[in-house]
Image: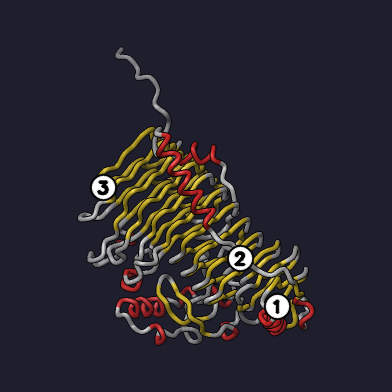
Amino acid sequence: MRINYFLLVLFLSFNACCFAQDSLVIQIQQIEESIETPNIPERTINVLDYGVKADDAKNDKPGFDKAIAALVKVGGGILKVSKGSYLLKGPIGLKSKINLHLEAGAVLNFSDTPSDYPLVATSWEGTFIYNYSPLIYAYQAEDLAITGSGTINGNGNGIWATFKTQEEADKLSSRKMNHQQTSVTSRRFGNGHFLRPQLVQFFDSKHILIEGVRFENSPFWCVHLLRSNNITIDGISYDSQNKNNDGIDLEYASNVVIKNVVFNNSDDNVAIKAGRDTEGRAKAATPSERIVVRDCKFKGLHAIVIGSEMSAGVRDVYVYNNEAWGYLKRGVYFKTNSDRGGYISNINISGNTFKTVEDAIFMTANYHGEGSGKHISKISKILLKNLYFDQAENFGIVLEGYPNQPISDIRLENIQITKAKNALTLRDTEGIQFKNIQIGEAAGTPSSVK
């Protein structure tokens, strides 16, 4: 994976110093070239040879389970899913050294019957729990792939959608368990509870490739990489419009490249997280770090998000050469509060273009006005450069720190917001640098006194 050095120098340099330019190019190059891709044997088996009918009527899960078991027995390989519509009453459990390959016209249709999904180790909004299995799930595995040009449909707009209005008690219960450091093995939800599962989750895994496939109609988050590393996501696409349908969630994730993705999902496009509150702060040794997002097309609620669950820290993130192809509520959004702790540091967002947004750039340490004031996050060392927005219907730029922990060392350079209802809000900040900022029409030559 080679990088266009000209674009990097053009979009990502901190200043005119050639040494700084070269240093930043090298940092990004090192991340991409250090990522280890899956090592999967070339042998192929077809799921149709294991009793699968692909008629969207018979439950095909037993056949998928048998095919995966057969691949495990011989040391892994490619599980070929030919054109057709497959009904799966329960999850696909991926194992090491397996590539789930969906050919053109292949559609995986997952049931929306909660009892089809057994209890597994997972997490929910930043807290580790046992809950309904994600629809495609891998735990403590390596050399994993989902590839091809088929579609993965979570059917999340039926029974799962009804869980949204019933989840509050379980959500608060999971957070209480987090704060009280309740043993994870006793944090059991699933049947009788209302926390929806993710569409795809790889947990405690490494050497991962997700390429080419389409994700639709997820019950909850679409693709969740949890405490995993060496991840490549390339050329996937979305049409997922249910509640909380984040496109890609990285949580305690490292060495990641996300590229050539076409987003169309009704929540965050890319959300970078690192655990919640007490539990997250205890895992500061595993922040989310060394992440590159490039050459993507954004559409949804928010394009690039850090938080709000980021208590173990987020650092060394590079977002460049992306563009919006539709409406977004916010373009760049950092969100945390004074229960989180942790930090957001060394973030470089450069060379990105957006259409109409509600807020162009919004950083807040007071998300939802929540927090006890005891665990304030530190937001610092941020570069936002060469960003263009057609219009901000509400705020252009908002930087909001905390009274005794200001947002600091933020550089904004070559930012153009052609039209904005409200231009700029700075609260509890220090060391903010502006260079070549335009919000509204560009100023011309001042008129003379008449």
Distance between the alpha carbons at the discs numbered 3 and 2: 43 Å
* Residue 368, placed above or below residue 411: below
Q: Give SS at disc 2.
A: loop
Q: Amino acid at mark 1?
A: Leu
* Left or right: 241 as drawn, with respect to 450: right
Q: Which disc, if any, is residue 429?
A: 3
What label does residue 87 carry, if any?
A: 1
Label number found at residue 38: 2
Give the colour scheme shown. Answer: secondary structure
**Residue placed at 78% from the left, 68% from the top?**
83
- Where residue 428 sits: x, y (%)? 24, 49
Which tag, 3 or 1, sits closer to the chain's start?
A: 1
Observer-nearest of 137 and 305: 137
Where 18 sits versus 229, above or below?
A: above
Q: Earlier in the sequence, mark 3 or mark 2?
A: 2
The crowd level at tag 2 (other Cα within 10 Å; few <14, some 14-19, many 20+) is many
Which residue is depicted at the point 70% across and 71% down?
A: 78
